[in-house]
Amino acid sequence: MEAADENADSAWASVDLAVAPQTVSALLDDPILLLRLNPCLEFRCLERLPDGGLKFDAHNESNACRLETDVRVLRDPGGAELTLLYSRGIKRATRLRLEPVPAGTRLSITESYATPDAQDAAHGLAAVDRSLVPWTAALRRHLERSARHGWIPGYRWWSTRFWPSMTPGQRRVTWLITWTTAVEFLVFLAVLAVYVSTGM
């Protein structure tokens, strides 16, 4: 399996998941869903190519940069690693690796970057993806909620198709509407309880 350039600059994040390694490995089998779960990426295009790679065009809210590139997808036959190699841009590769831990699985994400020369250093620093921590947090929420609520009819469709298809802004609005509706319903129930208890 090809590896990212060992001499490249890199950024990384990891998260421990209360989920079995085989469940997390199944998510790595679907790189489109994996990328769409990044809460900072707004995709103009994300599609699978005939050779198994991806066509990728997205605006990254974490650094206000646009990344338009083809992506070569490399999957470890053992199921413990996925590597995405980018054909354009300062980011060279994203590697996701799984490791069993007592509580479940540790997911580590490492991104490798071309080292810019001194003249382009400021531009290169601005292009570094700052979404790693929000992304790992979103993956943890997705996997743990799926393990907890996956038995509910329609939940898997919601969490793997409908929700990831929305832009980050649409997701924020949806959460706001959902929580506002829930709070309004609880207030209604409280008022109703007071009304019933007082016999009004």
Image: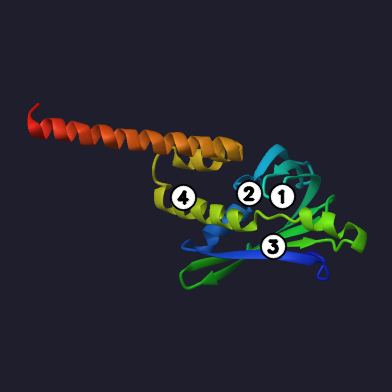
Amino acid marked by disc 2? Asp
Question: Could you tell me how far apart the alpha carbons at marks 4 and 2 are, in whole angstroms?
Answer: 15 Å
What residue occupies the far left of the structure in this picture? 199
Q: Are marks 1 and 3 in contact (CB under 8 Å)?
A: no
Quarter residue 9 falls in: bottom right
Q: Which residue corresponds to mark 1?
A: 63
* 137 to the left or right of 114: left
Residue at x 77%, y 58% (from the top left corner): 93
Quarter residue 112 falls in: bottom right
Q: Which residue corresponds to mark 3?
A: 76
Q: Which mark is residue 146?
A: 4
Amino acid marked by disc 4? Ser
Give the structural element (helix, strand or loop) at label 3. loop
Look at the picture and state if 43 lies above or below 124. Answer: above
What residue occupies the far bottom of the structure in this picture? 102
Neighbour tally class for label 1: few under 14, some 14-19, many 20 plus, Cα within 10 Å: some
Residue at x 46%, y 55% (from the top left corner): 144
Neighbour tally class for label 3: few under 14, some 14-19, many 20 plus, Cα within 10 Å: few
Q: Which residue corresponds to mark 2?
A: 30
